[in-house]
Amino acid sequence: MALPSFQLPEEVRLKALALGEAGLNWMAELGPVVRALEQNWQLSVEAPLHGGSASLVLSAVRVDGTQAVLKIGIPDESCMLMSQAHVLKLAQGRGYTRLFEYDEMRNAILVERLGTPLAHQNLPIQAQIEIICTSLKAAWVPLVAPNGLMTGADKAKWLAQFIKDKASELNVPCAKFIKRALEFAASREAMHNPSHCVLVHGDAHAANILQQLTEPENGVITYKFIDPDGLFAEPAYDLAIPMREWSDQLLAGNALYRGQERCALLSTLTGIDQKAIWQWGFIECVSTGLLLLQVGMTDLGTELLTVADCWVH
C-alpha cells in the first residue's frame, strides 16, 4: 500500500485512513501517481519532507536542475491543492513560493523549493514579527477583483457565524469576549472596501514562511510564504495572525498592554491602521481558541480565549 521507497508521515496516513475506501485507494495509487508526475513534469523525485499534514510532500529536481517540492493531497474536499495553486498563480512568485506545475485530477502541485521555516530558526519574537511584516508587504499583490477568492467581508461574516456556533456548542455563549468578537466582525464586514483590498495569505504564521535558498542580496536574507488560504481582503487581516500567535508571551505579563504594544509594532512596521489590526486580531484569538477547544487542544485554546478576555476593555 505504501510507496516502496518511503513511508507516509503518520498524520497523513491516519487522515487518509479516516476517509475510508477513498483514502485507501489514494495510498495504493501513490506509487503510480508519483511515477506519472515524474514523467509528465520531467522530475527526479527524492526524499520525503516534513511538514505535510494532509499531503505527501517530496523533494524533487526538475530537468533543468531547479530544486522543487512535489505535493500530493489526500482526496478530501478540505485538502484540495488547486485553491493553493490558484493563489500562487495570482502571486506569480511575488512573496510566495513559485508555482511550476499543477494537476487537478491528481490533486498535485509542484512548487519552488524553499529553506528552513522561520518558526525553526530560534529567533526572538520581535525579529520574527519584523520578518513576517517585511515579507507580507512584498506579498500583498494588488488585485482589482476577487478573482474567485473569498472576500474580507465574507470572511468576517463566516468567522462571526463560526464563533456563534462553537460558543454555543462549547457552552461559552455569555462570555464578554464572544460579544466583542461579534461586534468586531460586524465592523470589519462593514468596512470592507474593494479598492483597499489585496491578495491576502490568510494564515501568515511563522511555520508558513520559509527562507529562500537563493544567495542573500546585500547580505539580507529573504523569505517567501507557502500554503496560502488566499483572500481578497484588507491587509490588516494578515496581521491578525501574528497578533494571536505567541499567546504564552502575551500572558507572561499584562496581556492587554502587551497586545496593544504588539499591535502598535505591527502598525509601525506596515503602515496599516491599528484599529483594523486589533479588531481582526481579536476575532482570530476567539475563533482559533474555540477551534482548538473543539479539536481537543485544550491548553492552547484556553490560552487564546484568556488573551481575548484580557483584551476586552
Image (tube, rainbow, N blue to C red):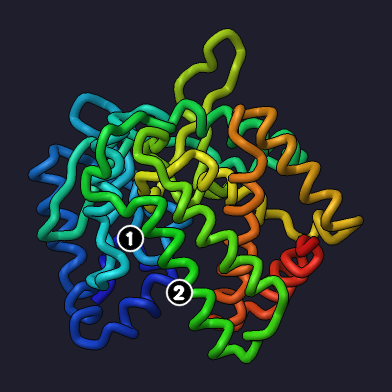
Q: Nearer the viewer, residue 107 or 243?
A: 243
Q: Tell whether 139 sits left or right of 61.
A: right
Answer with mark 1 or mark 2, whichever residue precedes in sequence. 1
Q: Which residue is mark 2?
A: 161
Give percent across and percent down for residue 148. 22, 49
Compared to residue 45, the image places residue 106 above or below, namely: below
Looking at this view, name the residue that lies furthest to the top: 218
Picture mark count: 2
Q: Nearer the viewer, residue 148 or 2?
A: 148
Residue 50 visible, this orientation: no
Q: Amino acid at mark 2?
A: Gln
Give percent across and percent down for residue 290. 59, 76
Q: Tell whether 109 sits left or right of 285.
A: left
Q: Tell whether 103 sits left or right of 309.
A: left
Quarter of the picture holding the C terminus: bottom right
**Nearer to us: label 1 or label 2:** 2
State yes or no: discs 1 and 2 in contact (Cβ < 8 Å).
no
Q: Which residue is mark 1?
A: 56
